[in-house]
Amino acid sequence: ARAALDGQAPPLVITLHGSDVPPADAPPGQVQLLRKLVLDADAVTVPSAALGASARERLRLPEEPEVIPNFVDTDRFSPAADRGALRALFPGRDLEGVRALCHASNFRPVKRPLDLIRIFAVVRERMPAVLVLAGDGPERPRVQAEVERLGLAREVAFTGPLRNLPPLLRACDLFLLPSAHESFGLAALEAMSCGMPVVGARTGGLPEVVEDGVTGLLATPGDAEAMGAMALRILGDEPLHARLSRAARDRAVRLFRADPVLARWEALYARVAAAGS
């Protein structure tokens, strides 16, 4: 299509995210079509080095795409001691000494949302705790059924889709992201920006966001027992929780603020435009 424009087509920049890179068992025609599109582009970016390596392998690219990470509004997603959002979800409940875990996603199978309940069950056996699940998606009914089966309905709140996530993140103590795969992990970054440690899976680009042992703890995907133990370790050690919280906020501000990332995008577009002029 670009060739048909006889040199008049504007420069093309492609950004690949997780679902854009075909899986190993994708139909060859799909892979060939995407490969041709990517090779025709003037620039290709990905949000993490892990996804870049995967894209290069799956699409047989001559080099890895340029990494420009996602960013977070660190002013909007900022720490504050406010449990108001939590009290609204558990009205009439005394939350003194209760630790709050949370998760936000589209509840697709890749997020392994049933693992959230398994992790929470491990924590709840050892300390008073509640779990808040924000978002909606195809796996939510199964998660709700598991909550009912385990008798955890009073301790687990489903918010549905939220327009304003920061108040919930500020009200909680630990963010869970046990996904089978994450091309980046924006939800984890938003939690970190609010000063919340993350327990999640060591997969895809998530270790590039969550520094294992510094801003949270990461386990093998699918190992809910290990993630439960990690959650207990963090929630049961106040100095450790405070240290991880400070480091989480610092990493978000230092590496993922909007302005520096946007500057990288502007430089990329300027470079591509200059090359095409």
Image (cartoon, rainbow, N blue to C red):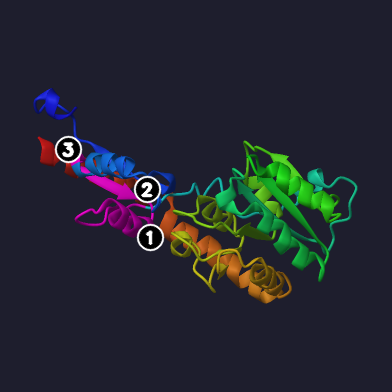
Q: Nearer the viewer, mark 1 or mark 3?
A: 1
Give the left or right position of residue 38, taking residue 131 as reference: left
Q: Sequence-wise, which precedes: disc 1 or disc 3?
A: 1
Please report the bounds of the magenta region as a residue range: 40-68
Amino acid, disc 3: Ala
| Residue plotted at (59% across, 49% down) | 109
- Give residue 120's position: percent from left, percent from top: 74, 61
Q: Is residue 86 above or below residue 234?
A: above
Give the left or right position of residue 117, taking residue 256 as reference: right
- Distance between mark 2 and mark 1 Cα atoms: 12 Å
Give the residue number, with chain letter if any, for mark 1: 50
How packed mark 3 is, by other alpha carbons closer than 10 Å (few <14, some 14-19, many 20 or more), is: some
- Give residue 137's position: percent from left, percent from top: 63, 40
Give the residue number, with chain letter if any, for mark 3: 273
Q: Is residue 66 magenta?
A: yes
Give the left or right position of residue 273, taking residue 176 as reference: left
Amino acid, disc 1: Ala
Specify whether residue 85 is in view.
Answer: no
- Distance between mark 2 and mark 3 Cα atoms: 26 Å
> Residue 8's mark?
none
Give the residue number, with chain letter if any, for mark 2: 21
